[in-house]
Amino acid sequence: MSRRSLLGLGAGAAAMVVAGGSARMWIYEKLRWGEDFFPGTPPDVELEPAAWTTTDTAITFAVLGDNGSGGRNQMAVAEQMALTYRSAPYGLVLLAGDISYYGSIEERYQEVFAEPYRPLIEAGVEWELAIGNHEISESKSDDAVAAIQAQVRAFGKPGTYYAVRHGPMEVFVLDTSIPLHTGEGGREQLEWLETALAASSAAWKVALMHHPAYSSGAHGSELRVRETVQPLLSSHGVDLAFAGHDHHYERTYPQDGVVWIVSGAGCKRTRVGSSDFTAHAESTLQFMLVTITEDAADVRAITTDGRVIDRVVLRKEQA
């Protein structure tokens, strides 16, 4: 398949550029979407193993979404993640889904995970995983079930949704893809979430999922997640909710106490606007670096050149 066909550009498409602004935007978006097809070189960075310190009162971790192309953009983000580890070591990465495009994780494990993140893997970094829509091919099938099971096995997770404690925080990993695309398991998962949140004694509570309740990007806000998940997070004191799906960076103002962050530009970029809930938004390749202590969470969005494009410090109210 040629690069032209991969990008979806036919012979007449280029001529559309002269037809007006909308045509130029169409071409621009197609080109940006196709950036991740260009081959890249895996990062050649050596890291000190287990250089981080996680305690009952402090943890540093990264967040990354929509990263699984195996192309140049993914490698650029992965390299900056490794370089950031050198100056601010972290022992955990939260993955917000779509970790393998254009094939299953079994087929592409080396290209989309082992090679890009070799420095972090060899340093002993842990990974938590939310299922994305590309993991299920956006439809119910035997192949989709097999792909999901393969990811759960590859990362050693108990299922497609679960809770796990890391230092002072508990991470509630949700599966938004299967309920949204097949209609299955939604009620059971919400019942589990309410029980798990109520039972948590963690100082900080963090949610991780693929579909964002608040987004000003191409896909936009997933209103079913907003209607069903947001009230539970708010009522049980969740501080941060991370998602992907849209390929940009966006942080909201607190929504009934919950700050939502779209971090879906791990290998692709699409345009983003602004909404009344938007505190900061940019269309740029990026990942997150978060440091949590007893009374504060320092949240940063970092681009491939190491710039911090957004930073916010959340304070935990003392009882």
Image (cartoon, rainbow, N blue to C red):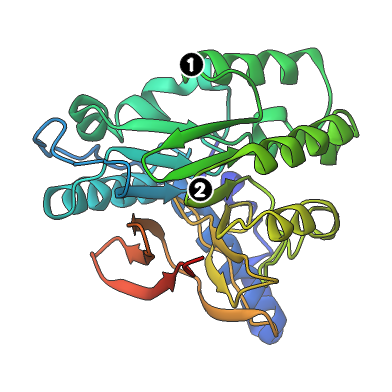
Image position, residue 319 (x, y; %): 51, 65
In the rendering, at what x and y percent does residue 222 appear? 78, 58
Residue found 59% across the figure and 48% down from its top: 207
Amino acid, disc 2: Gly
Q: Residue, x 70% and y 85% (percent of image)?
A: 276
- Rate crowding at label 2 as few (under 14), some (14 to 19) or many (20 or more) other CA atoms within 10 Å: many
At label 1, counting other C-alpha atoms closer than 10 Å, the crowd grade (few under 14, some 14-19, many 20 or more) is few
Q: Which mark is residue 186?
A: none
- List x then y, in percent, for residue 301: 38, 66
- Which of 249/31 is in front? 249
Rendering coords of residue 217 (x, y %): 66, 68
In front of the other: 114 or 72: 114
* Label 1–label 2 contact, CB within 8 A: no
Q: Say whether disc 1 or disc 2 marks the residue closer to the N-terminus.
A: 2
Q: Which mark is residue 156?
A: 1
Q: Is residue 127 visible?
A: yes
* Quadrant in the picture for the N terminus: top right
Q: Is residue 78 left or right of residue 239?
A: left
The residue tagged with tag 2: helix, strand or loop? loop
Q: Is 84 on the left or on the right of 213, as rendered?
A: left
Residue highlighted by disc 2: 65
